[in-house]
Image (cartoon, rainbow, N blue to C red):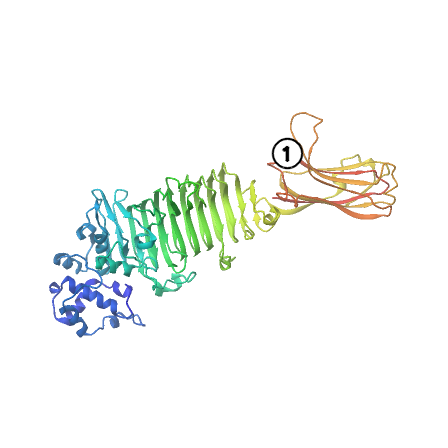
Amino acid sequence: MKLRLTQQEYCNFSGIITEVNFLNGVSEKDVSLQQVSAVRSITEAILIPKNNDETEMLGYTAKNIDAALTAEINPVEFNLGLDESVLSTLNQSNVGTLSVMAFGAVGDGVTDDSLAFQSALTAAHLMGGGRVFVPTPGVEYRLTYPIFLFSNTELFGTGASCRIIMENPTLAIKGRGCIVIGSSNEINRDKAITAYNAGTFPFASVTDRSFVNPNLGAFLRDNQQFVQSSKCSVHDLYLVARYTGSNLDGGYGVNMVNSQFCSVYNIWGEGWTQLIGIGSDVTPETPSNYECHAYNLHVITPNQNKTYYSIGFIANSTDCSIKCAKQIQPMAPGSANGSGVATNVVENIEIADIFIPDLGRTMSSEGILLNNAKNCSVKNIHIGNAITAVSTYYTLSEFNDKSKPNFINGIIAVDCDQAISIYSKNTTIDNVMTKNCLYELYFGNLNATENTIKYDINNFRFNTDKPPYFYLQNNTVKGWKYQYKYLRPGDIMFSDKSNANTINLNKTVATKAGTEISFLYNIPDSMKAIADVRCYLTFGANALTGNSAGASRVDLSLRRMVAFDGNSNATPFIEMANSRSATSDALTDTNLVTQATSTAPGFIPGKGSIHGLDNSLDVLIMMTNNVVNNVMKEIRIAYYGD
């Protein structure tokens, strides 16, 4: 079994050398570069003891050490390219910062600096951790192969002037990567180091299908045996993906795989299919991360051929974040995929302070996608020119956890089809502002239930798999609570009360023979939409034949004023109506209902109708061809409102 660069190797480099010197009777200055590589190869051959005991780990036999130090050796792992003076510096326990220039980096835009970068990073690892500095290049650094951080390593540059080009960061050979923290199945550190050592890069694949990632949903937080790198940072670099072949997409700028307690910040990017990767979700490439954070990110130009998530993606991970990020140029219209930031199979994730004024109308075109997530937060988001500013989604029922809801707060959507799209449950959404958006909220499918919407909405979109009222009744939407208003007919009687035979102080009005009675109720603004209106009534004796004008009849309608123009002859628009006539001379108790649930959108809005004025609805009930003691009883209005 080969040891994969675990925390047992994070002990101080000079401590390892001292142990070797003690066993072999040599001084530090006599240790050669090849011997250092041999020592490392031996430590990698040792099995991790079950008790995690470092003493046991170093308890290899003097015979094996002696053989390694005295034999003619071809280093197995990696030729660092260091001379004796640099090695002497590395052996000191107080080594500070290493420069990639000291390991052969040129930065002229022509020389392949991949080996120099990896040499510096590996040297830092052998020191037990360290800082690797990338000075401002004369032109730009050229990489042709991914570079990998081990643990306790900081890779940093000088900011936007520190330009690194990664050539053809495609999946087939290079596992998409430019800078990789950790190791996984798809982008494997051991395979890459072997290729560096053998000189077969950049043409040797970094994929190792024998490497086992944690399963999807088996988070690194809870499965520490999968940790590949810990306590690393990458910052102040300008990363560019450059494609020279027929494949024009696929690269990730910084990819964190099976890592924990890591940070990536102050990163500028051009041409990446995804600037930041924090885990993945396609079996067998399902690495996990824990407490990994990316912030102060600048996507200058996303990949114009295909962009997965221009800023970043968090998958199969917990307690991670992407914050303070912006995309400057839009993605190409109609290009594949194409969202800003997304998650899948995550817990305790924060996405915050994202500014994308022009996302681009790609195939998916979502500013933020929160997918299969629980206890996650999306806040302070500005998205322009997108199909959807923020979407929620789920495919795995275990992420519908009422005890761990998601929160979306502080969204500005400009020139989007819809500000918020919901395809999931258990999300609370508040403080959403829109400008030039077709819809403020879209209920996308049957999963969109049990959510809480705390901001005012006037313009909905509903999937057609269920009537709109299904979504309004199965979510809590501010100002759109489904409720009832009950009316006594005596309170809303429009006709002169002398036209009635009796008026009960509770809930009945009885008619006289041959008189008409009408009831009128003006819908208040607090009723944002009307779902149905219904009433109980009784046709009295002889209601079918007792009036020479015909059978007694009740008409119920919801009306809207069509214009404010002084035209007294204008007929109101009837939004919905129904009627009932007596069918028997016997005393008959019955009811009358008119409802909007059978036609889109399933309710009559108070505002936004093409048929007339906002806030001008009323309910009119007419009782005609009356006989004695036709009776109007209580009336109920089902509505959405405050």
- Where 160 sits versus 193, above or below? above
Q: Residue at x 56, y 47 (%)?
A: 463
Query: Which of these two is toward me, 433 or 66?
Result: 66
**Left or right of residue 428: residue 348:** left
Percent x, y for residue 365?
Answer: 45, 44
Position of the C terminus, as image quadrant, is top right
Is residue 150 at least partly visible in the picture? Answer: no
- Picture quadrant of residue 597: top right
Q: Dot 1 lies on which element? A: loop
Among all residues in the image, which is located at the extreme front? 246
Count of picture labels: 1
Position of the N terminus, as image quadrant, is bottom left
Is residue 395 at least partly visible in the picture? Answer: yes
Query: Which of these two is toward me, 118 or 536?
Result: 118
Percent x, y for residue 124?
Answer: 22, 57
Percent x, y for residue 35?
Answer: 16, 65
Q: Residue at x 42, y 53 (%)?
A: 349
- Pointer 1: what residue? 611
Q: Residue at x 46, y 53 (%)?
A: 371
Packing grade of label 1 (10 A; few <14, some 14-19, many >=20) is some
Among all residues in the image, which is located at the extreme top? 566
**Left or right of residue 213: residue 69:** left
Percent x, y for residue 87?
Answer: 15, 59
**Left or right of residue 570: residue 106:** left
Q: Amino acid at mark 1?
A: His
- Picture quadrant of residue 244: top left
